[in-house]
Image: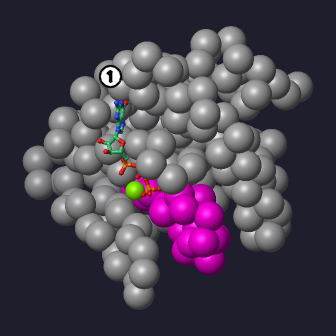
C-alpha cells in the first residue's frame, strides 16, 4: 500500500521495473528521467544504490498533472532491479512495499526462457513477501522490438499474458523511447484508479 506523507501531503507510490538481465529496465528509467514532465523542482535525481556487487537505480517525480486524492498529491517512485539471477536478495528488497510493476521482457527469440524464468521469479519473490501478483496492478512491456530476432507479439502474449485476467501489454524500443511512456502512463493510471477506489470504499 502506498505511503502517505502527512507532512508534505503526498501519496508515495512505488513502481518496480522487473525482468531478466539486459532486457532494458535501466534504459526505461533513464528515458523516463530524461523526458518526464514533472512539476517545477519535483523530479528527483537518478540515484544508483550500489551494494557490494550490484546496482539498483531509482528516482521519484511528481507529474505535472498529479492527481490529488483527498488533498494528497501523488508522487511516483520508479525502481529497477538487477536482472541477473544471482542478485535475488536485492530483488526481494526492492520489491518490498511495491504498489505496481512493469515487467519488461526481452523480445529476442532466444530470451524467451529467461523471460519466463524471471516472471516466475517475480511471483516467487512476491510470495516470499506474502504478496500476490493477482492483487498488484502490473503491465507487460515487450522491449527490443527493433531487433530482427524479435519473436511475434502473439507468442509473447501466449508465454507471459496467458492468465485468467490479461493485463495491458506494450511494444517498445526503449533506447529510442518508443513505448516507454505508453507503458508508464498505463501503470500510473491503473494505480491511481486503485487508490481512488480504495479511498472511496473506506469513506463509504
Ligand atoms: N536494440 C535495443 N537495445 C536495447 C533496447 N533497450 C535496451 N537496449 C540495450 O540493451 C542493453 C541492456 O539494457 P539495460 O537497460 O542496461 O538492461 P537492464 O534490464 O537494466 O539489465 P540489468 O540491470 O542487468 O538487469 C543496453 O545496451 C541497452 O542500450 C531496445 O529496445 N532495443
Ligand atoms: Mg539495469
Percent across and percent down for residue 19 are: 57, 48
In this picture, residue 191 sits left or right of residue 183:
right
Circle 1 sits on which residue? 178
* Residue at x 28% of width, y 51% of height: 61
- Pinpoint residue 64: horizontal percent, then vertical percent: 23, 37
Residue 136: horizontal and vertical position, in percent? Answer: 70, 46
Q: Quadrant of the C terminus?
A: top right
Residue sitting at 23 percent across and 61 percent down? 46
Q: Is mark 1 within 8 Å of ligand 1?
A: yes
Per the image, label 1 sits on a secondary structure element best described as loop
In the rendered view, would you say 192 is above or below 202? above
Asked if the stretch drawn in magenta spans residue 85, the answer is: yes
Name the residue nearer the viewer: 3 or 96. Answer: 96
Label 1 crowd bin: few (<14), some (14–19), many (20+), radius 10 Å? some
Q: Quadrant of residue 63?
A: top left
The residue most toward the right is 164
Left/right of residue 24 with respect to residue 42 in the rendered view: right
Q: Which residues are magenta?
A: 74-98
Residue 186 visible, this orientation: no
Q: Is 176 included in the stretch rendered in magenta?
A: no
Residue nearest the observer in this picture, 74 or 152: 152
Question: Ligand 1 quadrant?
Answer: top left
Q: Total number of numbered labels?
A: 1
User: Residue 102's x, y, as percent?
Assistant: 54, 41
Residue 129 drawn above or below residue 191: below
Residue at 20% in and 53% down: 43
Residue lying at 62% horizontally and 64% vertically, measured from the top left: 85
Quick check: 116 left or right of 3? right
Q: Is residue 25 visible?
A: yes
| 90 shown above or below 189 | below
Amino acid at each position: 500500500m502506498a505511503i502517505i506523507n502527512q507532512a508534505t501531503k503526498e501519496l508515495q507510490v512505488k513502481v518496480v521495473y522487473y525482468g531478466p538481465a539486459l532486457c532494458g529496465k535501466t534504459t526505461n528509467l533513464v528515458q523516463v528521467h530524461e523526458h518526464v514532465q514533472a512539476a517545477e523542482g519535483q523530479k528527483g535525481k537518478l540515484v544508483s544504490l550500489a551494494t557490494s556487487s550490484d546496482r539498483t537505480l531509482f528516482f521519484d517525480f511528481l507529474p505535472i498533472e498529479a492527481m490529488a486524492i483527498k488533498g494528497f498529491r501523488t508522487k511516483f517512485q520508479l525502481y529497477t532491479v538487477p536482472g541477473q539471477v544471482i542478485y535475488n536478495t536485492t530483488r526481494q528488497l526492492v520489491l518490498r512495499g511495491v504498489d505496481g510493476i512493469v515487467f519488461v521482457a526481452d523480445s529476442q527469440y532466444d530470451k524467451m526462457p529467461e523471460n519466463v524464468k524471471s516472471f516466475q521469479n517475480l511471483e516467487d519473490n512476491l510470495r516470499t513477501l506474502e504478496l500476490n501478483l493477482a492483487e498488484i496492478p502490473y503491465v507487460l512491456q515487450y522491449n527490443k522490438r527493433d531487433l530482427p530476432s524479435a519473436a511475434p507479439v502473439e507468442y509473447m502474449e501466449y508465454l507471459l499474458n496467458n492468465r485468467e485476467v490479461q493485463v495491458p501489454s506494450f511494444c517498445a524500443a526503449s533506447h529510442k523511447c518508443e513505448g516507454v511512456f505508453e507503458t508508464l502512463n498505463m501503470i500510473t493510471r491503473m494505480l491511481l484508479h486503485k487508490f481512488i477506489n480504495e479511498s472511496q470504499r473506506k469513506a463509504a
